[in-house]
Image (spheres, rainbow, N blue to C red):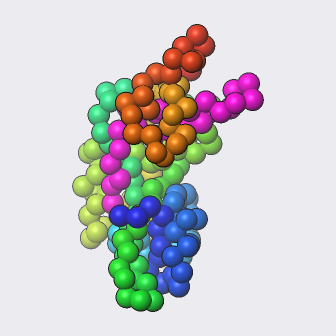
Amino acid sequence: MRWGLIPSWASDPTIGSRLIKARAEILTHKAAFYNAFRNRRCLVIADGFYEWQKQNGTKIPLLIQLKSKHPFGFAGLYESWTSPLGESVSTCTIITTEPNDIVRPIHDRMPVILPQDVEDFWLDSAIEDNRRLLELLLPYSADEMEAYPVSSLVNSVKTDSIACIEPARSVVQQPRLF
């Protein structure tokens, strides 16, 4: 799938670059997300995500993950868009919510991580009860998460290295943030 939701009604694919995230509290109000929220929910599988924290005038990249290091599912939405030339493009976005205590010092939002026991419910397209679905879009338990500084190598999309998930050597002298 291509990152950045392109609603089926869009006339231009560039809207997708502005729809890489969907705020949980607007899913039922914003036309770009409404139909996907009702009918095209998905999981975006990950084992961590990055945020950058400002410290002493620089931005420090942090890896945020489950303490267990296990993969998890972000709550996501998907669409299939057809270009004016008839090309079908599958796109997706992740849903964000308020941060938990781990993420709050770093960023004012966090992706919704769904607990495994509600993933099937989330994926069931027969469920259209907005209230019940919205109740799932909460911050994940901070007790089960951790965050630590990593190398600035993550700043380049060209980097594909284990160094992107290892604790950063250059900030080891600083106290661990979490």
Q: Please report the residue visible at 27 percent of the width from the left and 44 percent of the height from the top.
A: 116
* Above/below status of 56 relative to 3: above
The answer to whether residue 176 of the structure is visible from this angle is no
Q: How many marks?
A: 0
Residue 25 place in picture, x, y as percent: 55, 59
* Above/below status of 102 relative to 107: above
Residue 136 place in picture, x, y as percent: 40, 51
Residue 55 place in picture, x, y as percent: 69, 26
Q: Quadrant of residue 2?
A: bottom left
Residue 56 part of the magenta-drawn span: yes
The answer to whether residue 161 of the structure is visible from this angle is yes
Q: From this viewpoint, which residue is outermost toward the front?
A: 158
Viewer-closest of 20 and 138: 20
Q: From this viewpoint, which residue is outermost toward the right?
A: 57
Viewer-closest of 177 and 58: 58
* Above/below status of 114 relative to 124: above
In the figure, is residue 131 to the left or right of 117?
right
Q: Please report the residue visible at 55 percent of the width from the left and 73 percent of the height from the top.
A: 14
Residue 131 place in picture, x, y as percent: 43, 62
Q: Main secondary structure of the magenta part?
A: strand
Viewer-closest of 27 and 159: 159
Viewer-closest of 141 and 88: 88
In the figure, is residue 38 to the left or right of 13?
left
Q: Quadrant of residue 1?
A: bottom left
Q: Which residues are magenta?
A: 41-66
Q: From this viewpoint, which residue is outermost toward the top?
A: 173
Q: Please report the residue visible at 39 percent of the width from the left and 49 percent of the height from the top.
A: 74
Residue 93 part of the magenta-drawn span: no
* Above/below status of 165 relative to 3: above
Q: Please report the residue visible at 52 percent of the width from the left and 42 percent of the height from the top.
A: 156
